[in-house]
Image (tube, grey):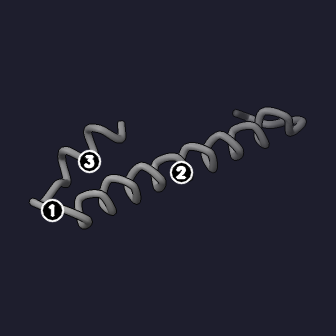
């Protein structure tokens, strides 16, 4: 998902701006994935959950 996002929203950055863009978008995707995983883990272990 990250590679598609990075290519799809690339707006011509170069140099340090390109490096910052790549690092920050990757970090944002990792943080989102971990957060989503934690939410699903919470609902999986919750008794009487509909998920």
Residue plotted at (17% across, 54% down): 10
- Asked if residue 42 lies left or right of residue 39, the reply is right
Q: How far from the left and from the top, in percent, is residue 42?
A: 78, 42
Report which quarter residue 16 is drawn in.
bottom left
Residue plotted at (28% across, 45% down): 5
Q: Nearer the viewer, mark 2 or mark 1?
A: 1
Q: Is label 1 in contact with label 3 (beta carbons under 8 Å)?
A: no
Q: Residues within 10 Å of mark 2 (few under 14, many from 20)?
A: few
- In this rendering, the answer to whether 16 lies above or below 7 is below
Report which quarter residue 48 is drawn in.
top right
From the image, tell me which residue sits under label 1. 13
- In this rendering, the answer to whether 1 lies above or below 31 is above
Q: Which numbered circle lies on residue 32?
A: 2
Element assignment for label 2: helix
From the image, tell me which residue sits under label 3. 6
Considering every residue shown, the one lying at the far right of the view is 47
Q: Nearer the viewer, mark 1 or mark 3?
A: 1
Q: Earlier in the sequence, mark 2 or mark 1?
A: 1
Mark 1–mark 3 distance (CA, rounded to whole Å): 11 Å
Q: Residues within 10 Å of mark 3 (few under 14, many from 20)?
A: some
Q: Earlier in the sequence, mark 1 or mark 3?
A: 3
Q: How far from the left and from the top, in percent, is residue 33?
A: 55, 43
> Which image quarter is the C terminus in?
top right
- Asked if residue 9 lies left or right of residue 46, the reply is left
- In this rendering, the answer to whether 20 lies above or below 27 is below
Considering every residue shown, the one lying at the far front of the view is 15
Q: Is label 2 in contact with label 1 (beta carbons under 8 Å)?
A: no
């Amino acid at each position: 998902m990250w590679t598609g996002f990075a290519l799809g929203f690339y707006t011509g950055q170069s140099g340090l701006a390109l490096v910052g863009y790549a690092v920050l978008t990757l970090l944002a995707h990792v943080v989102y994935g971990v957060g989503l995983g934690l939410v699903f883990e919470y609902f999986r272990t919750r008794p009487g959950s509909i998920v």
